[in-house]
Structures are given as structure tokens and as C-alpha cells.
Amino acid sequence: MAALARSGWEVEAVARVIDSAPVGPSLRRYANGAAIIAGGRAPLAALASLQDVERVFGRDRRGQRWRSRTLDLDIVLWSGGTWYGPRLAIPHPLFRQRDFVLHPAAQIAPDWRDPVSGLTLRQLAARAVRRR
């Protein structure tokens, strides 16, 4: 969170970190969390800033898609609703199926609505529990 603040982001809320199984072929477990950050950036500028923070932590985006990584920052939701481009889609296309995204996000923003489904993060997280 300190690295985000140093990059000009205001960290408004941070969820507890949870342990989760990998997506894809990795064998190691992952630590996942969520944060609400504000910075007045357009979506692509926000993405570039977050990828700069990933690089500071040693993230290399070249090569295998599902390989282990030191840090993975995603824009899952945005106060502007939806945004679609060739490098970025908001909301994140898979977030509704990923309990490791939904549960931390619901901790800090339970009433935030998915602009596509209209459901709150609390409702989406409850559905993820029932799917297990």
C-alpha cells in the first residue's frame, strides 16, 4: 500500500489478505486482497501506474500467462462504471467467478454494485460461496 501511495494513489480502504489456491498450472498458493484507491486517473493511465508498481516489485509480464508472480494488481471495478478497450475491461471480465476477488472486495465495499449485473459485492460473494 505504501508503494501505491508513493505513486500518487490515495489508499481509502484495505481488505484483510486471504490465502487462495492458484488459477492455472501453478502449485503455490497466493495471498489475495483488495483495496479502494483514488487518484483521478483515466483507466489506461491507472493501469499504467499499477503496472509501474508491479515492476518495482519485480513483476515481469513477458512469457507464460499463468506463471507465478511477485505482485498482480488488477482494476476490478471503477467508480466510472464500465470501460472497455483492447488492453483493459472494467469491470474485470472474470471477477464474478473468483471468490478470491469477491470476498476481499466485499469486506471493504459490500454495497458497491457491479455495473453489469446490478448485484452488490456482498451478493456476488454470497453466490461464490454457494458455488463451491
Image: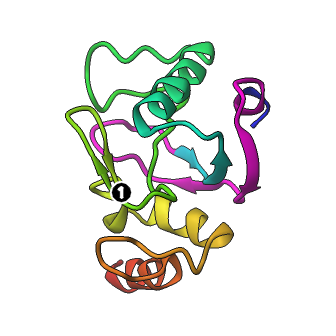
What residue is at 47 percent from the left and 26 percent from the top? 69
What x and y, as percent, mark residue 35? Answer: 65, 52
Q: Which segment is the magenta one?
A: 4-29
Could you tell me the amino acid type at mark 1? Pro
Q: Going by the image, does 17 lie left or right of 132?
A: right
The kind of secondary structure element at disc 1 is loop
Q: Is residue 6 magenta?
A: yes
Relative vertical location of residue 125 with respect to residue 46 in this rendering, above or below:
below
Task: Give the quadrant of residue 131.
Answer: bottom left
User: Which residue does the image show at 75% across and 46% down from the upper left?
Assistant: 11
Q: Dot 1 corresponds to which residue?
A: 91
Question: Residue 33: percent from the left, percent from the top?
Answer: 61, 52
Of residues 5 and 97, the one nearer the viewer is 5
- Numbered label tally: 1
Q: Residue at x 35, y 57 (%)?
A: 91
Q: Residue at x 36, y 71 (%)?
A: 115
Pinpoint residue 78: horizontal percent, then vertical percent. Answer: 48, 55
